[in-house]
Image: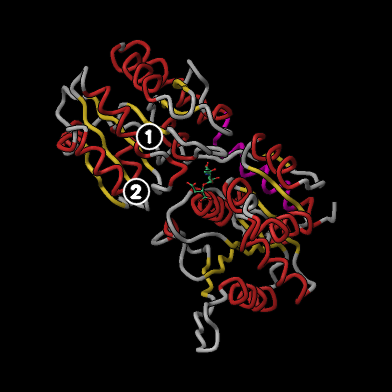
Amino acid sequence: MSMTTFPTPTDILKVAVLCHSGAGGSGVVATELGLELARLGHEIHFVGNAVPFRLMGMGGPNGPYFHQASAFAYALFDQPFPELTAANALTEVIYEQGVELTHAHYAIPHATAALHARSITKKTRVMTTLHGTDVTLIGAEPAFRHTTRHAIEQSDSVTAVSQFLADQTREMLKVDVPIEVIYNFVDTDRFVRLSDPAIRARFAHPDEALLLHVSNFRPVKRVEDVVETFARVASEIPARLLMVGDGPERSRAFELAQRLGVIGRVHFLGSFPDVQTVLGIADLFLLPSSKESFGLAALEAMSCEVPVVAARAGGIPEVVEDGVTGRLAAVGDVDGLAHAALEILKDPKTYQRMGQAGRRAALDKFHPSRVVPQYLDAYRRVLAGA
Ligand code: GMT
């Protein structure tokens, strides 16, 4: 990388990042953004209870850095207080590293922990990025309603990953603060079509259509709809389904595949870290979620020229253009999803057109070079007190 792409020392931002470490889109976005910013020469400090999973083994001489929060346990505490230990670790990072901005991904507990550290140090500003379930599930839960609203209203700046989520946040939580929409992005160099037949042969026969689902298998992902859709597709054409990820609904999906007699053609790969490889060889991506503020996995599929068949839920239509980069059906309409999947898979021209349009959208609308500057601009505005 040429030196001219690096910021001059006075332009270098020192940013702390709080995010979930386990498999999930918000942690992925936080990590990819941290990596991009570190590559550009900024100083990025992740703070938390565990290294975010996509950060493991990544980074370069300029970071990002990771600071472990204490796992202190005390007999009198009937449960741990990770939000407080994160706030404490963040406070130390702010004092020791001169961090001027904290970027919290997900409202509870990260924005709350960041606000705590701001109140202790009076030295950091807080930007909160809303990702989806922090508003649509956690924020809707009476147990977290007031604290979620407070975290959003007290942040110095708030962004949301789709227009749907920004609107939903205002409507559900009645918050009256500006919410800037900054879409998620995808590394289009890493998420590419793989044409090596040897890699594909590990997962499917050459004459089989290879369908793929990637998620954390929570109820909102409707993984049983994935299996139902696949069973309908597999009754008409030779096909195979890869289920990547793990979570509470995995056993139900497995049992359904057994009941429907497709178990030999459905493979549960678990938390498969090399997700770009399976995306790179897939023929179709299924995302039938009931709630989805954005659908990062769908965007990663599009970058790999894989058409997406998804539910018309939340922010998905802002990512997947119906009829252009894939097809959308109503939530729970497995017949509609299967029909759309078959239409695409049976017609090579449609298939190719949609795959190429997906790649183009990833390059034009969701490329890091388009999105990362929006975050940098937002950081600079919040630091300037705007
Ligand atoms: O639901 C997940 O898959 C995890 C969740 C998260 O916060 O880690 O994902 C949310 O954030 C992603 C990144 O911004 C979005 O792409 C997902 O659409 C969103 N999930 C939901 O809204 C259900």
- SS for callout 1: loop
Q: Indicate which label's residue lies in the foreground, 1 or 2.
A: 2
| Residue 8 visible in this rendered orientation of the protein | no
Side (left or right) of 40 relative to 234: right
Residue in the picture at 32% in, 52% down: 271
Observer-nearest of 331 and 2: 331
Ligand 1 within 8 Å, label 2 CB: no
Residue in the picture at 53% in, 67% down: 65
Observer-nearest of 367 and 307: 307
Q: Circle 1 sits on which residue?
A: 192
Q: Circle 2 sits on which residue?
A: 245
Residue in the picture at 48% in, 15% down: 323
Can you give x and y, in whole percent of width and height, for residue 21 in the image? 47, 61
Residue segment shown in magenta: 365-379
Amino acid marked by disc 2: Gly
- SS for callout 2: loop
Side (left or right) of 15 relative to 32: right
Q: Earlier in the sequence, mark 1 or mark 2?
A: 1
Q: Is residue 93 above or below residue 76?
A: above
Magenta stretch: helix, strand or loop mostly: helix
Residue in the picture at 60% in, 53% down: 138
Amino acid marked by disc 1: Val
